[in-house]
Amino acid sequence: MNPILQIENLDKVYPDGTVALSNINFSVYPGEFVVVIGPSGAGKSTLLRCMNRLIEPTNGNVIFKDKKINQASARQVKQIRREIGMVFQNFNLIDRLTVLNNVLHGRLGYTNTIKGSLGIFSKKDIAEAEEILDRVGLKKQKYKRADELSGGQMQRVGISRALAQRPRLILADEPIASLDPASSKNIMDHIYNICTEDKITAIVNLHQVEVAIKYATRIIGIQNGEVIFDGQPSQLTDRIIDEIYHNRKPPLVHAQ
Amino acid sequence: MLNKWKRVIALEGTKDIRRHKRLQTMLIILLVIGLTVWSAIGTDFSVYEVFSGVGLISNFLFLDLLPPDVTTSGSLLGAILETLYMGFVGMVVGALIALILSFLAAGTTTPHPIIQVVVRAFTSIIRNIPGLIWALILVASYGIGVTVGTLSLILGSVGFLTRVFADTLEEIDTGKIEALNATGSSYLQVLAQGVFPQFIPGFVAWSLYNLELNIRASTIIGMVGGGGIGFAIQKGIKLFQYKEVSMAIILVLVLILSTEFLTSKIRERII
């Protein structure tokens, strides 16, 4: 089976000299549910954004279905992005628009520029968006303004927007970091079930190890911009978790 | 033991910072006092002169200006409406032009940094020439009248609104823009579907505030030949028709206060 996504020798150095990623290499295969874990500032978000080129990599290749995203033209990047859905920590919905309109934003890449700008979508797209909202249990809220929803509901709209793209791959950046435990479980269940049912590959950034172990088919541990673990959840021992989260730096505050 | 020493050193440090801060405050106060005294000397400002003028002002107010001549209000009504039209047209046309320019001038939405610099510089020039000067320049080519008033208000509105619109655009949540980019949307789609909805409240609020500014400014612009109520006031002063002038001033106050009241109501409704 060919990998759906390949990361080759990926480096990212920010203009201020911060090395966010150094020499990342891995391949993701169709159907995998990969969870990337690591402390804040380890480079998880940067890694995810290099995959759909929201962030420009410094060196190395990101290959999605045999196409090098890092060498693609602006037009090709947009075409590739259509097939990659993204879910965000802060949901990133357009507050003043309706729930349905926010889901339809997932169709913008497939819609004519002028029509899309004016918010005119095909009947088929609208019907499909409604179907997706039904699936995540938000059918009744479709005409509500996005900012009237609760956090968990907003994230379900975020997932719906990604699904409206009919993606092959979903990237989720800390999708439950702003949610309470009950909503977190609900959101993770939705992401996991939908990806399994629709055969969508998923790469999810998380910082809760227990959640990662519960859902992941594969875990990648990142620390200081480097992959220090890549394997099955069962192979993730306490010692490795310790290594990922404790950089062996002296603690900030000394006890007396 | 080592930790204790560290804490002592840190405390010393904060004392130093506090002393430094106090010195800074003292210097600023001294500077302000010094500048005030200097400019008072420079302009020959004297408190005695201010008080000696009070008698003359009250003479002028109570004998010449008051009571206002109510019978002239009919003929002044046309002039006040002209002022309102000028302010409104200036705002609408100015807001539409500024809308386009601000998208080019804001760092978050500009298609290219060079375009951003050029548009910012251009509107900054327009903005920093007061409406009064525009009116004086334009009177030379269009003659006295409402055209001059409206044009100078449009220029003033474009200058002001482009700046505040661009600043508003730069404050919008870039995460949402990122989200739309991630779906493969085009530049225009991201602007229209992602940026614009976030921009509407600022757009409406600033445009309404600009309407208030325009109505105040159009009175002054009218005095140098821009037409409207300002021109009527200027004419009255030159012809010593002070009772008519006071009526006009009252009408201006009513117009300004009612616009302020209305715009704040509309703002509440929309945002």
Image (cartoon, rainbow, N blue to C red):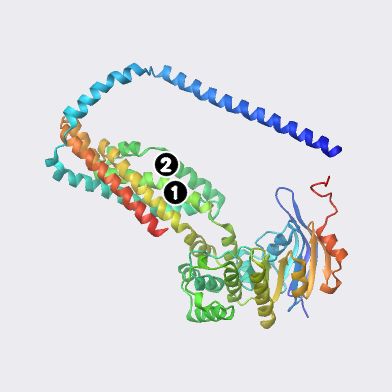
User: In the image, is A57 to the left or to the right of B204?
Assistant: right
Residue plotted at (88% across, 64% down)? A239
Residue at the limit of the structure toward the front, as seen here: A256
Determine whether label 1 and label 2 are within 8 Å by CB: yes
Query: Circle 1 marks a residue in which chain?
Result: B
Q: Considering the numbered disc 1 on the image, is that residue within a helix, a strand or a loop?
A: helix
Q: Position of residue A9 (x, y in %)?
A: 80, 62
At label 2, the amino acid type is Arg
Q: Name the foreground residue: B46 vs A203.
A: B46
Camera sees residue A232: no
Q: Residue at x 47, y 62 (%)?
A: B197
Kindly identify the residue that appears in the image at 43 percent across and 54 percent down.
Answer: B203
Q: Nearer the viewer, residue A217 or B226?
A: A217
- Secondary structure under tag 2 reads helix
Pointer 2 indicates a residue of which chain? B
Residue at the far left: name it: B71
Mark drawn on residue B127: 2
Image coords of residue B105 (percent x, y): 50, 50
Q: Quadrant of the N terminus of chain B?
A: top right
Amino acid carrying mark 1 in the image: Thr
Q: Reading the chain from its start, which is encountered first: label 1 or label 2?
A: 2
Residue B162 tag number? 1
Q: Is residue A182 above or below residue B82?
A: below
